Image: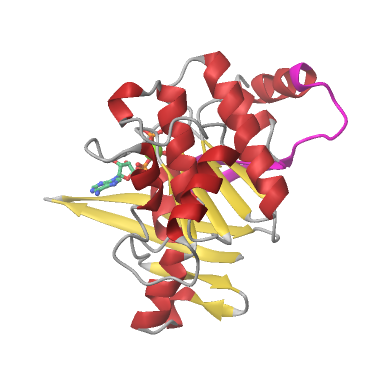
Amino acid sequence: MEIRGLAKRYATGETTVIALNGVDLTAEPGALIAIMGPSGSGKSTLLHVVGAMDVADEGEIVVGGRAVTALSRSELVEYRRRIGFVFQRFHLLPALTALDNVLAPVLPYKVDFDKDARGRELLASVGLGSREDALPSELSGGEQQRVAIARALVNDPFLLLADEPTGNLDSQTSAEIVELLLEVRRARGMTAFIGTHDALVASRCDRIVRLLDGRIVDEVEVPRGLEPEAVLDRITRVEST
Ligand SMILES: Nc1ncnc2c1ncn2[C@@H]1O[C@H](COP(=O)(O)OP(=O)(O)OP(=O)(O)O)[C@@H](O)[C@H]1O
Ligand SMILES: [Mg+2]
C-alpha cells in the first residue's frame, strides 16, 4: 500500500482544522506499523481515510496498483469489506452474544463460507472458544476486545486498522492484546496499522511512524533482536526528546 500526499481538512464554523497535511507512507504487505503522535496529530483521521470511512481532500492511497479514489462504488464496498477495524471502545452490540457480534458484519449477506463455523473458529482462535454465548456485559474489557478482533477477521481482511486498541485496558491486558494482534498478523500475513499512545504496543510493531500536526515527523524501524524492554527504552527516549 502506497499513501501519497494525503491531506484532510475539517471545516468547523469559521475555522478549518488541518488533520492531515501531506502524509506519504509505504506499507509493505504484511507490515505492522504503529502510528504514534500526540492527541490531535491525525492518527485516527489517517486510519479512517485509509479505511475509506472518510475521504481525503488531496492525495491518494494505492492498493495493489490501484488508487482507492478510482474505485467504482461496488469496488469501494468490496475494499471496505476486506478491511478489519478494531476500536478503543470495542463497539460490540450489547444485545448480541459474542458469537453473533463476530458474525455481525456478515449476518445480512450471503457468503461462501459457513458463518457459524467461521465465527466459532475465530472465537476459539482469540481464546474465547467457551464464551460464544456470553453477552458483552458478561465479558471483561480484554475479552470484549478479543471478540472485536475476531469480528474484524470475519471477512478475511488484507488490512487491519486498529485505533488505540489497548486504550481502555490495563497494562497486563494490553500486553496480551498486542500479542494476540501479533499472532493474528503472523498467522494471516495481513498488513496492519495500529494507532497508539502506548510505547509498549509500538515497541512490538515493525515500524513506528510519528505524526505531529498531520505530518510524519519521524519514521523508524523497530530494532530486531532486542529485548522488549530495550526497545521500549529507546522509544521512550525518542518520545521525551
Ligand atoms: N470530524 C471532525 N470534525 C472536525 N475536526 C476534526 C474531526 N475529526 C478530527 N478532527 C480534528 O482533526 C485533528 C486530528 O484529529 P485525530 O482524531 O485524527 O487525532 P488523533 O491523533 O487521533 O488524536 P487522539 O490521540 O486524541 O485520538 C484534530 O485537530 C481534531 O480536532
Ligand atoms: Mg485518535
Whether residue 234 is situated above or below residue 18 in the rendered picture: above
Task: Point out the residue furthest to the right here.
Answer: 225
The reply, left or right, for residue 32 in relation to residue 96 is right
76 to the left or right of 196: left
Residue under the image location 48 percent in, 62 percent down? 114
Q: Residue at x 53, y 19 (%)?
A: 173
Task: Give how far across and how far down residue 151 sits, in percent.
Answer: 44, 48
Relative depth, front residue between 124 and 238: 124
Q: Which residue corresponds to the image point at 51% horizontal and 54% vertical from the top-left?
A: 118
Where is residue 28 drawn, in percent x and y?
70, 60
**Nearer the observer, 238 or 14:** 238
Q: Quadrant of residue 176?
A: top right
How are the colours assigned in the image?
Answer: secondary structure
Residue sitting farthest toward the left: 13
Q: Nearer the viewer, residue 9 or 129?
A: 129
Which residue is pictured at 72% across the width and 17% down the height? Answer: 233
**Quarter-of-image position of residue 7:** bottom left
Q: Is residue 168 visible?
A: no
Height in image: 104 above or below 162? below
Quarter occupied by the C terminus: top right
203 inside magenta stretch: no
Task: Specify whether residue 228 is painted magenta.
Answer: yes
**Residue 222, quarter of picture:** top right
Query: Which span of residues is magenta-colored?
Result: 206-229
Could you tell me residue 214's position as x and y percent?
44, 47
Quadrant of ligand 1 in image: top left
> Can the viewer see residue 37 in this picture?
yes
